[in-house]
Amino acid sequence: MSKVNDIKNMKRQQRVITPTQALTEVVGEGSKQETNVGLNKEINETRKEEKKVERKRVSFDLRTDLHKELKLQALVQEKNIYILIEEALESYLKEDK
């Protein structure tokens, strides 16, 4: 939950920062600097493919703790929540067969 609090604190400081900027900030010290950036090219290709898919709007209730975690994962992975849900459902349905 500390990541959620960090994000809230950044917002409270009125610092304008995009999710990409937040993920590219340096993590670590000295020569061991790393970034949290994923493959933007792969993400963009996925989004282009998904524009072709026909979707049905649905509504359902979800526990608040799951919703918070889902929002955090969507931010970290730079994906929409519905994409994460679709991926999880596809994975679950494949296992069920």
Image (cartoon, rainbow, N blue to C red):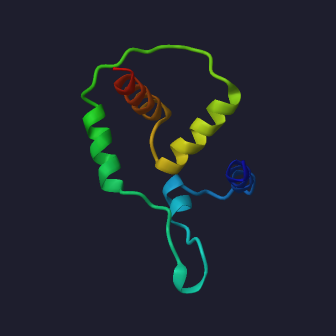
Q: Quadrant of the C terminus?
A: top left
Image spot of residue 29 (x, y percent): 61, 81
Task: Please tell me which residue is depicted at 40% across the width and 33% down the height of the picture.
Answer: 87
Would you place residue 73 above or below residue 58 in this image? below
Task: Please tell me which residue is depicted at 41% across the width and 57% down the height of the picture.
Answer: 38
* Residue 91 image-quadrant placement: top left
Left or right side of 83 for 65: right
Image spot of residue 21 (x, y percent): 52, 61
Task: Please tell me which residue is depicted at 66% across the width and 59% down the height of the picture.
Answer: 15
Could you say which is closer to the camera, residue 66 or residue 17?
66
Left or right side of 81 for 28: right
Task: Please tell me which residue is depicted at 53% across the width and 14% down the height of the picture.
Answer: 59
Could you say which is closer to the camera, residue 22 or residue 85?
85
* Residue 27 image-quadrant placement: bottom right
Would you place residue 95 above or below residue 80 in this image? above
Could you say which is closer to the camera, residue 94 or residue 59?
94
Image spot of residue 2 (x, y percent): 73, 53
Could you say which is closer to the camera, residue 17 or residue 74?
74
Left or right side of 94 for 49: left
